[in-house]
Image (spheres, rainbow, N blue to C red):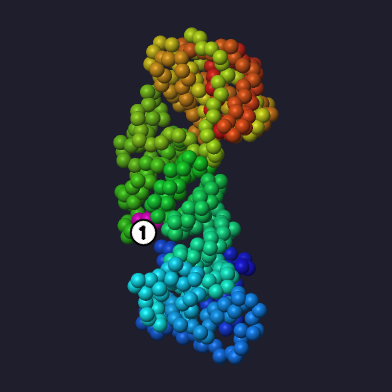
């Protein structure tokens, strides 16, 4: 299955544009699949194209040394044929000879067609919804086990293999698509994988989209996906892109959908076509500046939603918003956390100075947040800025200015970064939290070394060190920032 360097539909193109049969007498043009997944067809007025029968050949059997060679010789051959298919429509149609026994032996659908309770007795069967090139690829496989698919025919061949229940050929098509899967065609192939119910291919497409989200959404195929596919992507926690850039891509999709539905691309119509996709955009993950520059001025959100989100960004206690605030992180596996203290005590005060603790880890992880202690005076709201700083370079790698509510208990309360922060092994980092609020609980009997083991036996070891400088008092032994929440 050789391919060339140009491309059709995001896949490398075969410069031949044709596939030669094993006998060298029949050729079929390659064709692309239409956006809806239905094989293309031409006008229906023209008569089918005739396939010229081969000259009879006496004792041809003696020239074939194996059963495979003898059956391969009969592929697309009038010799001994007992059924013909008129495949395609109009000028592109072809009349293709076949042998009922071979087809019934390779496909349950053909077996039912020829031998079932409602078997056809017709010597000529019309298949207007099938592409000739794809049907010939199917027959070649049934006659000889040979796989002849290319970039232009793979989708129509997959459609035909599923239609006639030939899972082995279906598998070859999926394998071919998988080998050619890239960020710039991932959405195109994801749409087809969902259309043809190919979960393995769909999963691989989503993995590519997770790892190269920006490249994938900038490709032309993104704006062609259907609403359900858009929602399936927006639901994912594993996209690696800033939420404001994702919102911009969703607006482009909404504009394209308006044109498809023949609606003016005004704000009200964009809101309408987005429908169930709109609540899947995680507006709380944006900074207030990103929200103000993009979504707040887009006209897609209702005024009350814009006001509510601005309040969410700027005041405490925060009003409830109907949007997910869980960070997206390009990670796999379960969330983990470690607690470095063995005991909790009362009264840790705040005067605007940050609590800090240095640490390093034995393996690469991504930190998504901290667990912090709350008030000793009952339910209270805190304002807080959390940061992770690479200690030696004094570079801030992650920061979030937010707030949290506590219930007065000695539990820890989650405060999350907007994006995961990558932590590399044996590099010194500083965890920093600046709280504004009443006196809180704090931890004591701190551990210098904490090891977390997963169910698979993987161990992550944290080493903690006191952070010199302007520190509110947190150390290895006592203080704030008891928990680090991370993914391996």
Q: How many marks?
A: 1
**Residue at image point 61% right, 68% down:** 1
The x and y percentages for residue 98 are: 48, 79
Looking at the image, which is closer to me, 230 or 315? 230
Task: Give the residues in magenta.
Answer: 255-259
Q: Looking at the image, which residue is at 35% across and 71% down?
A: 117
Instruction: Give the vertical position of 193 relative to 40 (above or below).
Output: above
Mark 1 surroundings within 10 Å by alpha-carbon count, few (fewer than 14), some (14 through 19), many (20 or more): few
Q: x, y percentage for residue 344?
A: 51, 12
User: Between residues 59 and 181, which one lies in front from this camera angle?
Assistant: 59
- Residue 333 visible: yes
Vertical placement of residue 98 versus 216, above or below? below
Whole-percent x, y for residue 79 in the image = 52, 85
Q: Is residue 134 visible?
A: no
Q: Main secondary structure of the magenta part?
A: helix
Q: Quadrant of the C terminus?
A: top right
Question: Residue, x 43% and y 15% (percent of image)?
Answer: 409
Residue at image mark 1: 259
Please, is residue 320 above or below residue 159 in the view?
above
Please tell me in which quadrant of the rendered image residue 47 appears: bottom left
Quadrant in which residue 331 is drawn: top right
Q: Is residue 77 magenta?
A: no
Q: Position of residue 371 (x, y in %)?
A: 50, 23
Does dot 1 land on a helix, a strand or a loop?
Answer: helix
The residue positioned 53% from the left and 46% from the top of the image is 210
The residue closer to the viewer here, 382 or 18, is 18
């Amino acid at each position: 299955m050789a391919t060339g360097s140009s491309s059709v539909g995001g896949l490398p193109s075969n410069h031949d544009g044709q596939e030669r049969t094993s006998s060298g007498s029949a050729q079929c043009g390659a064709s692309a699949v239409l956006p809806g997944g239905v094989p293309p067809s031409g006008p229906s007025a023209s008569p089918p194209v005739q396939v010229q029968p081969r000259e009879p050949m006496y004792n041809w059997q003696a020239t074939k040394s194996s059963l495979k060679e003898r059956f391969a010789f009969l592929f697309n051959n009038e010799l001994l044929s007992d059924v013909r298919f008129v495949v395609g429509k109009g000028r592109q149609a072809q009349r293709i000879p076949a042998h009922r026994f071979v087809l019934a032996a390779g496909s349950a659908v053909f077996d039912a067609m020829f031998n079932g309770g409602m078997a056809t007795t017709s010597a000529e069967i019309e298949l207007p919804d099938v592409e000739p090139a794809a049907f010939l690829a199917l027959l070649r496989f049934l006659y000889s086990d040979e796989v002849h698919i290319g970039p232009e025919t793979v989708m129509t061949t997959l459609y035909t293999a599923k239609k006639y229940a030939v899972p082995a050929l279906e598998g070859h098509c999926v394998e071919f698509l998988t080998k050619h899967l890239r960020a710039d065609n991932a959405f195109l192939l994801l749409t087809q994988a969902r259309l043809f119910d190919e979960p393995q291919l769909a999963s691989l497409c989503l993995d590519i989209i997770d790892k190269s989200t920006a490249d994938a959404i900038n490709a032309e195929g993104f704006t062609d996906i259907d609403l359900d596919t858009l929602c399936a992507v927006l639901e994912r926690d594993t996209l690696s892109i800033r939420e404001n850039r994702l919102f911009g891509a969703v607006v482009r999709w909404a504009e394209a959908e308006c044109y498809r539905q023949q609606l003016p691309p005004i704000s009200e119509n964009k809101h309408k076509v987005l429908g169930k996709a709109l609540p899947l955009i995680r507006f709380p993950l944006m900074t207030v500046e990103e929200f103000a520059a993009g979504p707040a001025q887009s006209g897609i959100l209702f005024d009350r939603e814009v006001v509510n989100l601005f309040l969410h960004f700027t005041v405490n206690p925060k009003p409830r918003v109907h949007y997910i605030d869980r960070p997206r992180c390009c990670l796999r596996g379960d969330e983990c956390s470690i607690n470095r203290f063995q005991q909790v005590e009362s009264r840790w005060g705040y005067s605007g100075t940050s609590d800090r603790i240095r640490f390093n880890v034995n393996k690469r992880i991504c930190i998504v947040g901290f667990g912090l202690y709350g008030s000793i005076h009952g339910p209270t709201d805190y304002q807080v800025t959390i940061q992770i700083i690479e200690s030696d370079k004094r570079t801030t790698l992650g920061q979030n200015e937010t707030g949290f509510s506590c219930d007065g208990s000695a539990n820890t309360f989650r405060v999350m970064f907007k994006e995961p922060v990558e932590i590399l092994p044996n590099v010194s980092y500083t965890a920093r939290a600046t709280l504004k609020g009443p006196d809180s609980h704090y931890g004591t009997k701190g551990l210098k070394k904490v090891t977390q083991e997963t169910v698979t036996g993987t161990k992550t070891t944290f080493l903690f060190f006191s952070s010199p400088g302007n520190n509110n008092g947190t150390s290895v032994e006592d203080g704030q920032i008891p928990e680090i929440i991370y993914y391996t």
